[in-house]
Amino acid sequence: MLSYLLVLAVLVTVDAQIIKGEQKDDSCVCKLSSSIWGFPTAKFEAAQNKLQTCEENLIEFRKKIQASNVQMPKLELSLKNIKTRLKPFEYLDTNGLYNALHLQQLVQELDQMYSTASDIHKKTSSKEIEGLLKELTNAKKEAQDMYKDNFFNLETMKSKLLDLNNRVQTCKTIPEDFSSTCHQRIMSSISSPVVTKLNSMSKSYISGAWGRDAKQDNKERYFEHCLMSGNQLGITIRIYNSYEDFIASKNYKDETIAPSYGDKNAVQGSGTIFYDNTVFYQCYNSIEICSFNITTKATKRMKLDGAEINKFPFCYYSCRDWTDFDLEADQDAVWVIYATEENHGNIVVRRLDPLSLNTTHTWKTRLFKRSVTNTFMVCGVLYATRFVNTYREEVFYAFDTLTGQEINTLSLPFEKVAAGIANLNYNPVDRRLYMYNDGYLLAYNTFN
Ligand SMILES: *[C@@H]1O[C@H](CO)[C@@H](O)[C@H](O)[C@H]1NC(C)=O
Ligand SMILES: *[C@@H]1O[C@H](CO)[C@@H](O)[C@H](O)[C@H]1NC(C)=O
């Protein structure tokens, strides 16, 4: 298996060089996007948990052996050996290889230990040995599961494939104004809040979204969307036709998106965005994106293959449920930021055509979605933030879809009035960043 994968990596590299030469409809491209990502890949957390349990069990065995004072020098040595060998597996991203061979060897070692222990059991039966056998059985099963479920992974391979995928995406035709409005790619600072207001409904609605219609030349409209029903669901959206009305919480119109909270078109989660008088959001209890056009009252749906419900929410500091899809908008596209198991829970960015909801591009980052507070897009650059303290948040990461480059060294702080962030979205019309901050609505000016 190992050598097969490595051979393939070489082939793929060769293909990618061909792709770079503008042959974007080359069949190699299809091969890359359809088959490569089907590889068995590690379920990061599950694998880590299993390793932890496994190692804990081993530590327990050792304690028991010592406690029962049975002479098993060989077993002891085996334990030490396995523990050392488990070390490299502890973090998939530091020591790379995580392959079937290691796991098979681990299972074999556990088998040997088991037979040694049961020999002893036959001669001198004791409670300790019985317990030990039971736990060895469990550990063996765990190791076998790791093997069976393909919990092995080649980190370098993954990394290579990721780069290749992103390069292919960027190879695709990218519209002119994708980059034209942003002469300098990366944002340089964020102002103090220029708007700070409690939402117009209730302080208890700590989850939701707010902002301004993101389509250039469209009527100036502000939206306010508070999640009800356990901070999970919404069925209406509050629209203001001017900034003054928004500030005064008057002359608004509550538009109905769905008839009830259990309706399939109800809004789930706080990733909502408003573009071209249309609400884009995660549809109730599904991995589909919905768009509700307020002008026509029509709802469209599109499935995001590989997405998960409440498995990879934003989790930095504390997990915020129902943040599976973070929708963003710019001049002529809607973006969705989410995570897939296939990409190890790391963020995937898709660019959608707002009218058909068809995907035009898909990039895969190395940023673990659960390790950030929230994200937003500016001029095709994805930004991620992390919690510093209750009153301070920091942009620490950027991913440029134009180059596929990741920047991990950003430090753009900005102020908050409460700890948690339900939604962050950038508006290309007024170049403001909008935040739903535990029931408070804040906005900032941004500088490139
Ligand atoms: C919403 O409907 C209006 C009227 O038909 C149309 O002009 C607009 O393009 C639609 N927008 C979206 C995003 O569906
Ligand atoms: C969207 O995708 C569907 C299905 O692949 C296709 O039939 C349709 O033509 C696409 N629409 C646009 C506007 O690209």
Image (cartoon, rainbow, N blue to C red):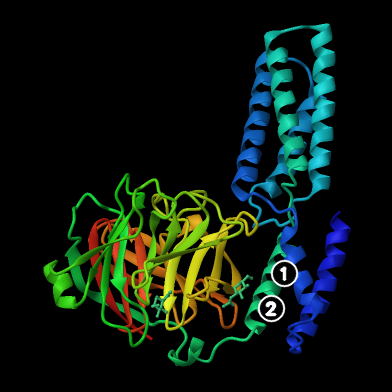
Q: Residues within 10 Å of mark 1 (few under 14, many from 20)?
A: some
Residue corresponding to mark 1: 33
Frontmost residue, 171 versus 192? 171
In this view of the protein, which residue sits in the foreground, 42 or 440?
A: 440
Would residue 121 appear left or right of 235 to someone viewing this image? Answer: right
Dot 2 or dot 1, earlier in sequence: 1
Kindly identify the amino acid type of the residue bearing the numbered disc 1. Answer: Ser
| Residue 130 location (% of width, % of height) | 72, 13
Give the percent coordinates (x, y) of residue 140.
Answer: 75, 30
Query: For the residue labelled by badge 2, is the local secondary structure a helix, a strand or a loop?
Result: helix
Q: Residue at x 46, y 82 (%)?
A: 332
Residue 86 coordinates in the image, percent (x, y): 71, 42
Image marks 2 and 1: residues in contact by CB distance under 8 Å: yes
Count numbered badges in the picture. Answer: 2
Q: Is residue 77 left or right of residue 182?
A: right
Q: Quadrant of ligand 2?
A: bottom right
- Quadrant in which residue 440 is drawn: bottom left
Q: Give coordinates of residue 242: x percent, y percent.
A: 19, 78
Q: Is residue 275 above or below residue 152?
A: below
Q: Determine whether the residue tagged by mark 1 lies in a helix, strand or loop.
A: helix
Which quarter of the figure is the N terminus placed in? bottom right
- Disc marking residue 168: 2
